[in-house]
Image: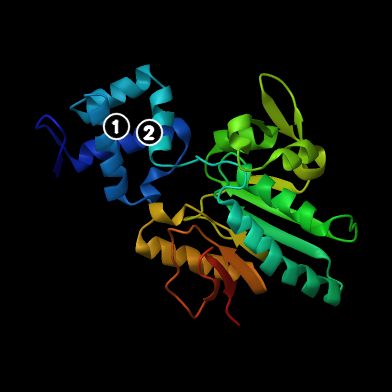
Amino acid sequence: MEEIKGGNEVTQEQLDKVVHFINKKKRIDLCSYRQSFIFRHLRSRMSDLNILDSLDYITYLKNNPKEIDLFLEDLSINVTHFFRDPEVFTAFQKGPLAQLISRKTKSSLNLIRLWSAACASGQEPYSLAIMMSEALGNRSDFVVKIWATDVDSEALEKARIGEYEEKDLKEAGNKILEKYFKPVYNGKYSVKDSIRKMVRFEKQNLISEPGLKFIDAVFCRNVMIYFTREQQEALFGKFYNSLNSEGYLVIAKVESIWNKEMFVNIDPYNKIYQKAS
């Protein structure tokens, strides 16, 4: 039991009611996240609003639906932009991706399958598609398939529409913007069809549902921090089983993999791992 500013206490039962309400409204399973993490951010939001009781906070959520988005943003859930940490994309393209394309070419298996796990509103998988297009250039002998999964139906719908504000493209640069996007309205930009057709969006709960198969690289960044150690280890095992031999796993710089029997760290700075043989 922890105290909120003002001396009132928030119990686990009250916390569970807030989590259940948000789960129902946004279809985001916050129960999968570390409860201490959720608890801390709940206290912070309530303190900012000078609300001393979680039931009053639920009432506030009902009357102010945008507060749910603010709470989720405070958790950094579904907060992303194109080419987030651009050096990671550059390092992956120059190293692992170049090697992957070379291996595929030699074996005449010119199909590359990527998985953007917890893709939010689509910025990461579309960034991967652009990276693939840049890496392959004029080669037409390759087929690229990118699976993009998330538990949030609303975020996935936005991703399928593929329209973004200029702030989402701050790391892309003018060259990428002109080549792969087209202006639509109100300062927004739409992903061009050549990129859109590479990506398939599907709803999936990373914790409770099976992983994909025959994947060449998994990108799962800024997600592990919300899970318990046990959940993280289970997820790494799921990714291991999803990857082809010599496949790659990319996680966030603030995240780590402990099981060296599953993955070899080939780029410690950018947190790029390769499936152990």
Query: Residue 145 placed where, x, y %?
Result: 75, 55
Q: Is residue 212 visible?
A: no
Q: Which residue is at a point 58% across and 65% down the rendered structure image?
A: 249
Q: Position of residue 97 (x, y in %)?
A: 71, 65
Quarter-of-image position of residue 220: bottom right
Quickly name the residue at label 1: 45
In this rendering, position of residue 270 left or right of residue 101: left
Dot 1: element: helix
Outermost residue to the left: 7
Q: Residues within 10 Å of mark 1 (few under 14, many from 20)?
A: some
Amino acid carrying mark 1 in the image = Arg
Residue 81 placement: quadrant:
top right
Q: Are marks 2 and 1 in contact (CB under 8 Å)?
A: yes
Identify the amino acid type marked 2. Answer: Phe
Q: Is residue 18 visible?
A: yes
Q: Residue at x 52, y 76 (%)?
A: 262
Q: Which residue is mark 2?
A: 71
Placement of 59 over or under 103, stated as above or below: above
Q: Secondary structure at mark 2?
A: helix
Q: Residue at x 60, y 48 (%)?
A: 149
Depicted 70 relative to depicted 103: above or below: above
Residue 221 in percent (x, y) is at 52, 54
Spatial separation of the CA atoms under disc 2 and disc 1: 7 Å
Q: Residue furthest front?
A: 174
- Indicate whether 222 appears above or below 62: below
Q: Which mark is residue 164?
A: none
